[in-house]
Image (tube, grey):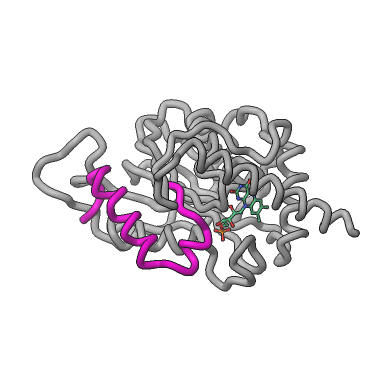
Amino acid sequence: MSSAKTLRKLFALHLSAIMVLSLAACAGNAETTPSDSGNSAPSDEQIPNESSGSQEAKTTFPESTAAPATDSSEETDSGASDSKILVAYFSHTGENYGVGVIEKGNTHIIADMIAEETGADLFEIATVNPYPDTYDECTDVAKQEQNDNARPEIINPPENPDQYDTVFIGYPIWWGDLPMAVYTFLESCDFAGKTVIPFCTHEGSGLSDTKSSIENACPGATVLDGLAVRGSVAQNEQEEAKEDVIEWLDGLKYTN
Ligand SMILES: Cc1cc2nc3c(=O)[nH]c(=O)nc-3n(C[C@H](O)[C@H](O)[C@H](O)COP(=O)(O)O)c2cc1C
């Protein structure tokens, strides 16, 4: 058996264990879980260290074409009235866990829903070197990057987020944490004083400890509790996923 297949089996076993633990911890919860739950990394030693300082910024965020989100005249601490919002996401197409070969990534689907509901701008975090299409190869590359605490170069990294008050940051859970390209993105910007809101897709880990990872990578930002959606639900049960997205945004006062 190839090492890739062995890894895949090991990962599938990890996911099974994760799902059992998640179910035990969150008995009764729906598949979409606004979560502050603890762990669920595939294995502890694969979690990268805290991120280092920011890197030099080079370009700008995408131009805004959308109206700022409005909710009501009454604004809350986390409300969106008059705020300018960005949805930045990383998402992988090709072969993926439990959904076969996909043309639009699971996280991308959720990112589009959030942007539609909030009137936010969208920014795709894409790497200069694309990830392999096949699942086994992609997991190998992602694991190696995590072990190396790598910062893969991203296309058109943002210069600064000054025009945005709120940044939704979306990603698939990779080996229990953020894909390393998301660290590249977060460390490219100064989010101090901004509100950063995580959302992820996953196949059992929920948000894992990614809220903490984001807090560490974004000093001075207010990081809210995030939304975790199963990738297979995002891909194949979009009405259900959308209801959960809207309910979550309503709770945050971020719907139009
Ligand atoms: C490299 C890699 C590592 C993954 N690691 C995990 C994991 O640790 N926990 C988990 O629940 N799902 C894991 N998954 C499954 C993805 O999080 C899930 O399929 C996600 O919805 C993919 O989103 P995307 O289509 O936006 O990339 C992994 C998938 C890949 C490709």
Magenta residues (range): 227-256
Q: Residue at x 61, y 42 (%)?
A: 18
**Residue 181 visible in this rendered orientation of the protein:** no
Horizontal side of 127 relative to 24 (left or right) equals right
In percent of width and height, residue 182 lies at 57, 45
Q: Residue at x 50, y 48 (%)?
A: 158
In percent of width and height, residue 60 lies at 46, 51
Vertical side of 104 occupied by 153: above or below: above
**Which is nearer the eye, 25 or 65?**
25
217 in magenta: no
**Which is nearer the eye, 35 or 142?**
35
Point out the image quarter for the N terminus: bottom right
238 in magenta: yes
Main SS of residues in magenta: helix
Vertical side of 235 occupied by 35: above or below: above
Horizontal side of 52 relative to 242 (left or right) equals right
Q: Residue at x 44, y 41 (%)?
A: 27
Point out the image quarter for the C terminus: bottom left
Vertical side of 247 occupied by 196: above or below: above
**Which is nearer the eye, 24 or 30?**
24
Q: Quadrant of residue 176?
A: top right
In percent of width and height, residue 183 lies at 58, 41
